[in-house]
Image (tube, rainbow, N blue to C red):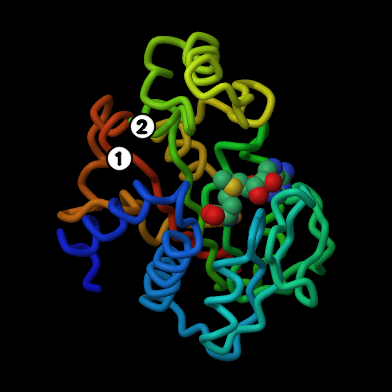
């Protein structure tokens, strides 16, 4: 599907709305979409990919389907449900068991908001990426309508309140807790931090799912914190 386009954004949105009932369809679509985004900058066939925080392995499976040698690094065994075991490594993104410059592409989808120290996490992604290789990093920022994850959009009224409301309504413990496994990451601050780095340069900064001019929203101070939804950064590793 053409990216950006209303058709694509609508298909992704519909898949997300059914994610709880049919995660396989939602994540297969998302993985294809992410692989298409990567292939605008780098063909996947024959490349070495590190999928950091790869969870159930939908992205790694899609990258391998396209001919890449993709390996999944994930610290939480509970997240690995269905992940391809032979290419999965139990490892933390802060300390990847890879040599410097081992990967052509270091990929992380929706992980940055789950780490306490995104700067160190990015440094490790940059370390394992070869000079001139690419880094794909996307995250849902805190003030996005989905920033509160399963308790969104009530996080706008406060994280504790939103989490308690979710638990009361569903009778289930919430998966995320602010400051524990979810952190209030911002679009503007992240862009400033990444621009100040000397190990990567920004190739593209855009809203991952927007149907029109996706590069515009992350440039608009204040508005970007709500409207970006999910920030996608394509970074090039400096030689
Ligand atoms: C929302 S899931 C995203 C999974 C998958 N990348 C996707 O987009 O569907 C967040 C993932 O980040 C992982 N994660 C959290 N902290 C991490 C860390 N320090 N290093 C690597 N992965 C981490 C979690 O275990 C979880 O699998």
Quick check: is the Cβ at mark 2 less than 8 Å away from ligand 1? no
Is residue 62 placed above or below 135 in the rendered structure? Answer: below
Name the residue carrying label 1.
Answer: 228
- Identified at 43% across, 64% down, the residue is 25
Q: Secondary structure at mark 2?
A: loop
Q: Residues within 10 Å of mark 1 (few under 14, many from 20)?
A: many
33 vs 55, left or right, is: left
The quadrant in which the C terminus is found is bottom right
Query: Which mark is first along the chain, 2 or 1?
Result: 2
- Identified at 57% across, 62% down, the residue is 107
102 vs 7, left or right, is: right
Report if the CB atoms under discs 1 and 2 are less than 8 Å apart.
yes
List x then y, in percent, for residue 163: 53, 17
196 vs 86, left or right, is: left
Name the residue carrying label 2.
Answer: 144
Quick check: is the Cβ at mark 1 less than 8 Å away from ligand 1? no
List x then y, in percent, for residue 91: 81, 55
Q: Residues within 10 Å of mark 2 (few under 14, many from 20)?
A: many
For marks 1 and 2, give the one nearer the viewer.
2
Question: Residue 38's image quarter?
Answer: bottom left
Question: Residue 132's image quarter?
Answer: bottom right
List x then y, in percent, for residue 16: 37, 50
Residue 140 visible somewhere in the drawing: yes
- Identified at 57% across, 89% down, the residue is 67
């Amino acid at each position: 599907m053409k990216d950006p386009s209303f058709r694509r954004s609508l298909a992704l949105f519909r898949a997300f709305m059914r994610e709880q009932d049919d995660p396989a369809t939602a994540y297969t679509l998302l993985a294809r979409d992410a692989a298409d985004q990567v292939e605008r900058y780098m063909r996947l066939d024959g490349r070495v990919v590190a999928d950091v925080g790869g969870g159930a392995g939908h992205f790694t499976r899609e990258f391998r389907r396209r001919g890449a040698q993709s390996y999944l690094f994930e610290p939480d065994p509970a997240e690995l449900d269905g992940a391809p075991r032979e290419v999965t490594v139990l490892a933390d993104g802060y300390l990847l068991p890879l040599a410097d410059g081992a990967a052509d592409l270091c990929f992380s989808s929706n992980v940055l908001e789950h780490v306490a120290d995104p700067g160190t996490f990015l440094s490790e992604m940059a370390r394992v990426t070869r000079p001139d290789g690419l880094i794909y990093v996307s995250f849902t920022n805190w003030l996005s309508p989905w920033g509160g994850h399963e308790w969104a959009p009530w996080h706008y009224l406060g994280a504790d309140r939103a989490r308690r409301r979710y638990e009361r309504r569903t009778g289930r413990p919430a998966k995320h807790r602010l400051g524990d496994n979810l952190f209030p990451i911002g679009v503007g601050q992240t862009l400033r931090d990444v621009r100040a780095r000397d190990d990567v340069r920004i190739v593209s900064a855009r809203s991952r799912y927007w149907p029109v001019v996706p590069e515009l929203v992350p440039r608009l101070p204040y508005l970007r914190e709500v409207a970006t939804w999910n920030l996608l950064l394509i970074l090039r590793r400096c030689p």
